[in-house]
Image (cartoon, helix red, strand yellow):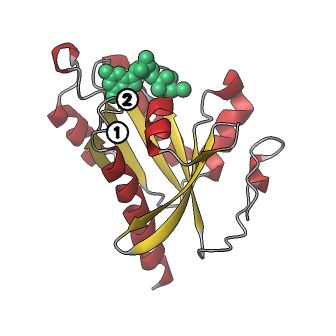
Amino acid sequence: HRDSCASDSSDSVISTGSETDQVYKVVLLGEHGVGKSSLARVFGGVEDGRNTYDRSIIVDEEEASILLYDVWEQDNNQWMKEQCMKMGDAYIIVYSVTDKSSFEKASELRIQLRRARQSENIPIILVGNKSDLVRSREVSVDEGSACAVVFDCKFIETSASLHHNVQALFEGIVRQIRLRKDSKEE
Ligand code: GDP
Ligand code: MG
């Protein structure tokens, strides 16, 4: 059994990795209201009471353990935001397709992340959530994917409400992490 604790110091979020060799720390970023917590709940797993979800998924016939952090807005303090930028093995930057300003914010976050983790090639997936709300859409699929090209990250549209593409999102994150890890080891 492993302990996950995001309270005192996020640097102490260490995985002992008993059953699998590694636990991937995945951090949700994005403006308030875009659906981060909804995506986290659909992803599921054991929630530790501190907005951290612990779950294993099988991707390409191999198990992966994910610790998903929905703490970006927690206490709304700067310290937490800095920790978030430091601690992830991978990032999910969420915007709402119904909210242009959340899309612009996503680009800002990508830039901040690049600055915080300069030399590292961390996996990032840009997520356009609320794809079910077709009539109030403000950001097209093309705009989303073009942005992902510019910012050198993967892109997917999801609907947390309809559970659409949420599984694909987390499988994608695991594949990205594995890819980068393998290329590092070579
Ligand atoms: P957060 O602030 O980023 O954690 O966003 P929440 O997960 O709290 O979601 C904000 C609001 O958007 C809530 O009312 C959700 O029910 C709603 N919401 C989240 N995801 C979706 C979605 O995919 N489709 C629709 N229609 N509503 C969503
Ligand atoms: Mg939330």
Q: Residues within 10 Å of mark 1 (few under 14, many from 20)?
A: many
**Residue 152 against residue 102 in the figure, above or below:** below
In the rendered image, residue 55, in percent from the top left (x then y), is placed at 55, 55
Q: How packed is label 2: few (under 14 Cα within 10 Å), some, or many (20 or more)?
A: many
Quadrant assignment for the N terminus: bottom right
Decide: marks 1, 2 in contact (CB < 8 A)? yes
Looking at the picture, tell me which residue is in the foreground, 105 or 70: 70
- Identify the residue at image location x=25%, y=47%: 149
Q: Amino acid at mark 1?
A: Val
x 45%, y 31%: residue: 38
Residue 151 is left or right of residue 68, and the answer is left
Secondary element at image label 1: strand
Residue furthest toward the bottom? Answer: 186
Left or right position of 41 against 152: right
Quarter of the figure that contains the C terminus: bottom left
Image quarter where ligand 2 lies: top right
Please state the horizontal and vertical placement of residue 118, each as a whole percent of the image.
Answer: 54, 54
User: Of helix, strand and loop, which one carries label 2?
Assistant: strand
Residue 81 or 23: which is nearer the viewer? 23
- Extreme right residue here? 8
The quadrant where residue 143 appears: top left
Question: Which of the labelled discs sits on residue 19, or is there none?
Answer: none
**Residue to which mark 2 is pinned:** 95
Q: Where is mark 1, residue-wise?
A: 127
Compared to 158, does 95 lie above or below? Answer: above
Which residue is drawn at the image coordinates 64% and 51% (left, top)?
Answer: 87
**Labels 1 and 2: the sequence-earlier one:** 2
Q: Amino acid at mark 2?
A: Tyr
Question: Is residue 156 in view?
Answer: yes
Q: CA distance from mark 1 to mark 2?
A: 6 Å
